[in-house]
Image (spheres, rainbow, N blue to C red):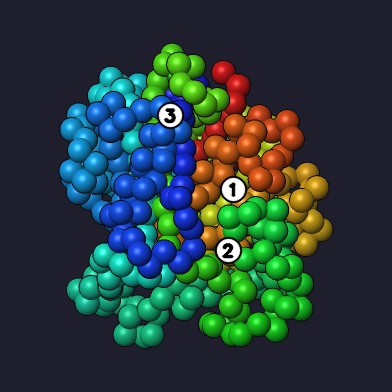
Amino acid sequence: MRRNQVAIVGAAETTRLGIIPDMSQIQLHADAALNALADAGLKPSDIDGIATAVETPQQIAHYLGITPTWVDGTSVGGCSFMLHVRHAAAAIEAGLCKTVLITHAESGKSNIGRTPRMIGPDSFNGQFELPYGVTTPASMFPIPVLRYMKTHGITHEQIAMVAVVQREWAAKNPRATMKDPITVADVLNSRMIAYPFRILQCCLVTDGGGALILTSADRAKDFPQKPVYILGTGESVETPMVSQMQTFDSSRAFRVAGPTAFREAGITHKDVDHLMIYDAFAHLPLYGLGDLGFMPHKETGKFIADRNTAPGGKLPCNTNGGGLSYMHSGMYGMYALQESVRQMRGIAPAQVQGAKISVCHGVGGMFAASGTIVFTNQQ
């Protein structure tokens, strides 16, 4: 993909976030989509490309009255929307469509109109992990995390600091679910879920959604909002079974998606003004910092504990509060993308002054997939 040839011209989340018991999952998709269309000054008939995950593209297109010439139903977990951005940019460049709508929504808390998630007994997970009690993210992620801590010398206090910093960012965000300050002691004294994770190190469970609209850069200046250009992209997958990762102390999918996006964008780590790293659980920013090449893994815990990613730090990270404190409906990647766009537009609640480049990095499943998008507000 060529740099800066495609831009985000519409971006919005659902009108409400948190607990929304009076709206079904597909209604949340529509709410987010209509908000993004209003943000871009468009109507459904202006859209000729559509991408979504969990819900199928045909359901969303039918519900919104859209007749697309390009669709993408890639569904690889929470980073699906990073992959949708990458695929949509390529489709626009190839002339397959002109204006793409990407939607996401989940009734993660209220479970209204939501297809239940299940592990098929004939799947890899069902055959080789489920019989041993490895059933949910909270029981899957500890497998690599304990090895990561041992290999790289990461402490419980350093991982707890991730949650503390996320809460500080959330306190600046009126739409965040959790805003009350917490300390490392609060985190380590909170209820144990699955060792080493305590509840304050686990993602929220909420309802909500978001949508993005992409078009070519040569059209972008005709829209009412400040364009946010796509500078670089990357994607990869590893394994659906966390027990079969290539190595527990690093993510192969991260090591492919992140550096690919950096190379495509033509940037170095010192060029990054703002960073989003999917934080369904508190360890993920550590893996992200290491696998994206910001520093050796053994330095990631101290880097966060020393407040480098906190408000006022040299690498602002997860400035919306993240999946730990902002919101997490089940697939968080859309909300990370929304925050990167807000930062590049200069309208985020906790705005990083002068930010010109934002890196948005996601995970799908338990390190099963990854997607990275580099945004800029400079053409």
Q: CA distance from mark 1 to mark 2?
A: 18 Å
Disc sitting over residue 177 in the figure = 2
Q: CA distance from mark 3 to mark 2?
A: 27 Å
The image quadrant that residue 348 belongs to is top right
Helix, strand or loop at label 1? It is strand
Q: Which residue was labeled with disc 3?
A: 40
Query: From where the camera sits, is residue 189 visible?
Result: yes
The amino acid on which the numbered mark 3 sits, given as a three-letter code, is: Ala
**Vertical order, 127 against 36 (above or below):** below
**At x 45% / y 16%, what residue is drawn?**
222
The image quadrant that residue 169 belongs to is bottom right
| Left or right: 74 as drawn, with respect to 235 | left
| Left or right: 371 as drawn, with respect to 22 | right
Ranked by sequence position, the earlier of labels 1 and 3 is 3
Dot 1 crowding, Cα within 10 Å, few <14, some 14–19, many 20+: many
The amino acid on which the numbered mark 2 sits, given as a three-letter code, is: Thr
**At x 38% / y 85%, what residue is drawn?**
133
Circle 1 or circle 2, nearest the eye: 2
Q: Position of residue 160 (x, y in %)?
A: 69, 71
User: From the image, which quarter does the N terminus lie in?
Assistant: top left
Helix, strand or loop at label 3? It is helix
Dot 3 crowding, Cα within 10 Å, few <14, some 14–19, many 20+: many
Ranked by sequence position, the earlier of labels 1 and 2 is 2
Dot 2 crowding, Cα within 10 Å, few <14, some 14–19, many 20+: many
User: From the image, which quarter does the C terminus lie in?
Assistant: top right
